Amino acid sequence: MRSSRKPGKVGRRAPWLVLSAALVLSPLPALAQGATPNGGVSPDRQSSSEQNGVALMRVIVPDQKAVDQLNDLGVDLAEYTRPVDGGIEVHAVLSPAETKELRSKGYDVRDAISDQQDVTKLRQEREKTLRSLAQDGQTADTLTPLRAEWFTSLEGQRFLSIEVKTSTPDATNILTATWNNGKDTEPGSGGTATMSRFTDAGQYMYHRFTSPLAIDSAPTKATITSSSGGSVTVPVKEWLGKPRKAPGKHYVSDFVDHYMDPTEVYGRINGLAKQFPKLAEIVDLPNKTNGYRRNAQAQFGTAAASTFYVTSKAYGSDGGNDIELTLQKADQPSAPLSVSVDGKNVTVTLATDADGAATSTAKQVVDALNAHAGTLLSADTYRGDAGSGVVAESAATKLTDGLKAPASVSRKPFQMQALRIGGKRDGSKPGVFLYCQEHAREWVTPLTCVETAERLLRNYRLDPATRKIVNDLDIFVLPSVNPDGAHYSMYDFNMQRRNMTNHCGPAESDPGNRNSWGVDLNRNFSVGSLFDGYSGASASCRSDVFAGPAELSEPEAKNEVWLTHRFPNIKFAMNTHSYGGYFMWPPGAYKVPGRELLPRADLGTESFFWASSDHILNSVQSWRGTAIWPGRTGPVPDVLYSAAGNSADEHWYNRGIIGWDFEVGADIWNPATKRFDPVGFQPPFAEGHEEAMEFASGQIGILEVARAYASDKAPPKSKLVVDGRQPGSTTFTFTTSEPATVYYTLDGSRPTLKSPKLTAAGTREGPEKLKVDKNTEVKWFAVDIAGNVENHYNPDGDRQNYRHQWVTVKN
């Protein structure tokens, strides 16, 4: 514990590989000019045989359609994406065979992330070619600036991020940004760069830099020009501002010193509840998980190929591991096939022909075992094979569940628990739900939840700010949503993403597929799900984004929903994942084609998300200086991809819970190579520790936002601002003193909560501009996120204390 602050899947096979002969794929878009599959990159990393040679690989795809296709094929995609020249970079967990298969289908699979080899960059010859395609004399486009910010991260390196929309978004229109070198310096003195065109699900979003640009000094202005003749100059602001000051000298932090499995994590929160009984208690969640357990199995075959496998009826830990199967040839010619059972020893005596050679086929042995040993085990032919191959003899083989965790990890169904923290835990205070590790392989995330709980309880007595948080809120910490999968990731297959419940049938349940089973818990919820037609999840039981057999089929997902219903005072939530350094919020899913999103939050709520991000991300930055990029902040589909059936959407749309998503593990700037390096799911603990510390600080920031919400009794103020006058029309909009929703009328009627709302002008844009063509009395009022109404106006009453103003029009 430190009292001072620091400065500043084994055998996982994707279904598209096994069933590739049956797939009929639509042609992929052409690769970027000059790119070839694996052209000039380093060889695939060969992991140990224990991990089946998987590696975290870079894959460059042309557009979001190709990302969706990878999802549909069941490719194990990381929750990481970023635009690159020529398309989108995604990261996938692939074996060498899977890498070869993807490349044969035209995918641009690159080098490995996990061994930190240099990424082969896409060639940047497009600008000259596309400029030559631009036609002379075309009408200048309109450029709409969205964001222009500079920021510092980690070692004080400055970066520049700019986002701009063009009214002519076709690929022949090239946007270039130039910026100055600080106050009172010449335009363009800071540098120039071509911007990348960002599209998603076939729709143009905006232009931005592939990654924030490293710069030497803080610019104050930037000019963006297009090859179509458009130009706009914008002020460049500081993103996040200065990190918040460190807490008081008595504040303690840093309570984790190694990666912890769920047994340790849950032991830690139980210990905290016992140590601080006046401030914390354990809430048992009603649905136990399936458990860290598997049925025992063994596989048999000829000298050339597998022919059948057997699976114990009991879990391995419940006796399945004690079953033994022997395959022996009858000791006389023309003998029949037979099966004998002695306790847990099963013997198959193979039939022979007149010459004494074994003749029993796999199908015959499978039928005989199911008929005569069916109380102990079930038998199936290998991956749906007809079973015509003749079975070879085999010495006594003991079935095994293959699990490697020590005895300290229980094989029984797991009792999930939440640590409830608060000075007054009776439901009268606003609740905040912090939950981590929905995905098993994200080892940093449970440390984040544990660290947050430790800081809250151990600083309560001496730190006034902590005491206010604990006294004014009702906090629920669920440190590992996926305990079974996390145990499996820790001890068996580090790239396990899902839980351990196998919903596959016999054709996909042989031992070689044991790392391909389970449900992606963050695709198993009931809003915007695969079953509703949304993108980003799979119906394949062996896909790493498998949505499950039905919405909320899994006990882990049911427990989250139960908690939010059991404690209706929960108003805020944070779902912590890794990696990439994102800060996101709903909506989280859309349908394709057409990129049909779940309903966006209204402008007031969206403004609250953005305003809160400033405080929360400043809290992250306060630990070691890490800045989350502006381009990785926003609604999920705007900065990452569609995630059908995710938990944040569940809580927001069904319960009105304001929910965020962290992706811990921001890219780290490498000054030697002048590039950002991704950190992966399981970075060396020294890095993982820092990620846990900084995002625990971010969780504390979320609690501070929630407390401010709880104490907010001040109504917002608003103003009508005329934006422009032209003969025959006037445009105007509204500004507010804080994030708030504006309701207005233009027909002279009294405004109510059913009146039109002021909306955003577009994705990542500010408020819309309203236009009237005659003198109009505008009536309106504003409501903030806490429900405070401007002027204490009652929309359902009959008083007239709404705001009103005439907007005049010149003929």
Image (tube, rainbow, N blue to C red):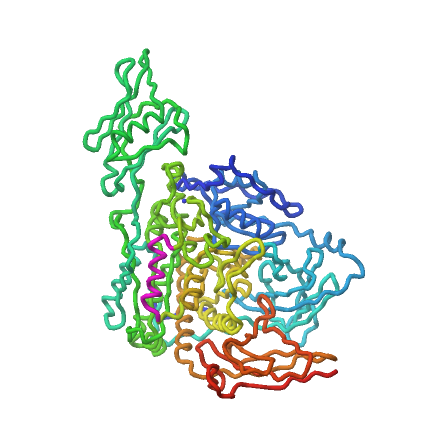
Quarter containing the N terminus = bottom left
Return the residue found at the far right: 137
Looking at the image, residue 135 sits to the left or right of residue 656; the answer is right
Label tally: 0
Q: Which residues are magenta?
A: 552-568
Looking at the image, residue 387 sits to the left or right of residue 674; the answer is left
Q: Residue 439 placed where, x, y %? A: 40, 54
Looking at the image, residue 9 sits to the left or right of residue 180; the answer is left
Residue 197 occupies which quadrant of the picture? bottom right
Q: Is residue 794 above or below residue 631?
A: below
Q: What residue appears at the point 32 percent right and 26 percent down from the top-left corner?
A: 365
Q: What residue appears at the point 53 percent right and 72 percent down from the top-left corner?
A: 603
Q: Would you say residue 368 sits in the magenta stretch?
A: no
Return the residue found at the far left: 343
Q: Residue 248 placed where, x, y %? A: 37, 77
What secondary structure predominates along the stretch shown in magenta? helix
Residue 746 occupies which quadrant of the picture? bottom right
Q: Residue 90 placed where, x, y %? A: 53, 51
Between residues 425 and 467, which one lies in front from this camera angle? 425
